[in-house]
Image: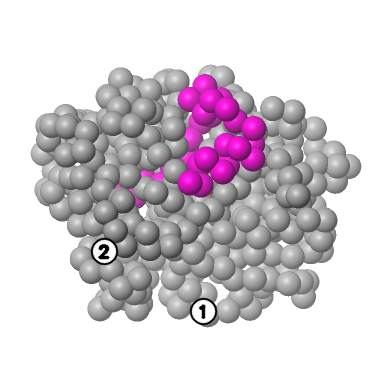
Amino acid sequence: MASGIKDKVAILGMGCTKFGEHWDRDADSLAVEAYREALTDAGIEPSMIEAAWFGVGQDQVSVGASAVPMAIALRLANIPVTKVENYCASGTEALRGAIYAVASGAIDIALAIGAEKLKDTGYGGLPARTRGTTWDMMGASGSAPGNFAQLAAAYAVKHGVGKADLKRAMAHVSVKSHDNATRNPKAHLRKAINIEKVLNAPMIAEPLGLFDCCGVSDGAACAIVTTPDIARGLGKSDLVTVKALSLAVSNGWELQGAGWDGSYFHTTRIAASRAYKEADISDPRTQVGLMEVHDCFSVTELVTMEDLHISDEGKGWRDVLDGRFDADGRNPCQIDGGLKCFGHPIGASGLRMLYENYLQLLGRAGERQVADPPEFALTHNLGGMPNQNVAAISLVGLLGA
């Protein structure tokens, strides 16, 4: 009988580049920077890494179709290197491979790395089928903002939320992320904004305005994982361990009948329930004290709070306006600026989220450090469109939590 991976894997070290417009750098150099920081943090030699997983969403732009370029860039010692892709959950998919290898006992020390060079597509958003690289989003028609605008409309109708109230709640999400990012030197966008600026910005896809949408960034992030016993043997004392990692992929149910009303993410609800069970979390509202979620659009973060069972269904927008997810709220969310302001290089995002939670749990987040380190910290990735997607959730905490 499977028993899960709770506390079987410890994070030995992590690294992350500054996200942004790195016109003078390629994906390899960004990955090397994140890798070197992780090695230094872990306090190990490269030869001690036994296997690696590399997450990338736009491989033809970033590194090519195989894992070989990344193995060469990092000078890995002829070890197994696997390239994985799962839309915007690609970084967490790489982490899943590394974590499961260690938890199984097959590998002592493993590497998970994600990198992306989206700015090189020459397009202002994620590549469409006719621009940049060829990217068929499961045959989806329309734009990403258009699809997520429909999510906002469905949510508002289902829960009777007025247009003005919904827009103000979404604006609060964006203002919060911008404010948090001003304290993060590695964030792409570090300029504070106010509610009025968000509400008066150009409309992209009603009700999503310019500041409701995350930007396009380059960057890389990296994690080195091992067992708690090995970590202690290497001199580590305060250990951040993995409590759960869950991934749910749409099987098409959302489009095959009348069961889904378009107002929430079915896969996130499934992945969250599985993760909480594996981590022995009975009350996520009080136990999950820090979150990094997939705020590709402001409404996504708002809806995700309900899908993660932090907010009651239909009440997430009220919790947003009440400041529950602010830096000084009960459940701080996007303390580093999130996708909205830290940036969203697809393959790196899941690992970037983990990087922030890792720093916060160890009390190393500097100016943005939360006052009371949480019992559990959560990351959430959502890849694809609301009607067909993949949701990935990781939960970490200090050993013994």
Q: Quadrant of the C terminus?
A: top right
Magenta-colored span: 270-297
Residue 30 seen from this side: no
Q: Residue at x 31, y 51 (%)?
A: 259
**Residue 64: image tag:** 1
Q: Residue at x 60, y 30 (%)?
A: 281
Residue type for callout 1: Gly
Residue 124 locus on image (x, y percent): 26, 63
Quickly name the residue at label 2. Answer: 124
Q: Residue at x 57, y 37 (%)?
A: 276
Left or right: 157 as drawn, with respect to 257 = left
* Quadrant in the picture for residue 375: top right
Q: Nearer the viewer, residue 310 or 52?
A: 310
Residue 272 locus on image (x, y percent): 50, 42
Tell me which label, 2 or 1, sits earlier in the chain: 1
Residue type for callout 2: Gly
Q: CA distance from mark 2 to mark 1?
A: 21 Å
Residue 237 seen from this side: yes
At label 1, counting other C-alpha atoms closer than 10 Å, the crowd grade (few under 14, some 14-19, many 20 or more) is few
Q: Is residue 201 above or below residue 49?
A: above
Total marks shown come to: 2
Residue 289 drawn in magenta = yes
Which residue is situated farthest in the right direction here?
A: 233
Q: Nearer the viewer, residue 160 or 121?
A: 160
Rendered image coloring scheme:
one colour
Label 1, secondary structure: give it. Answer: loop
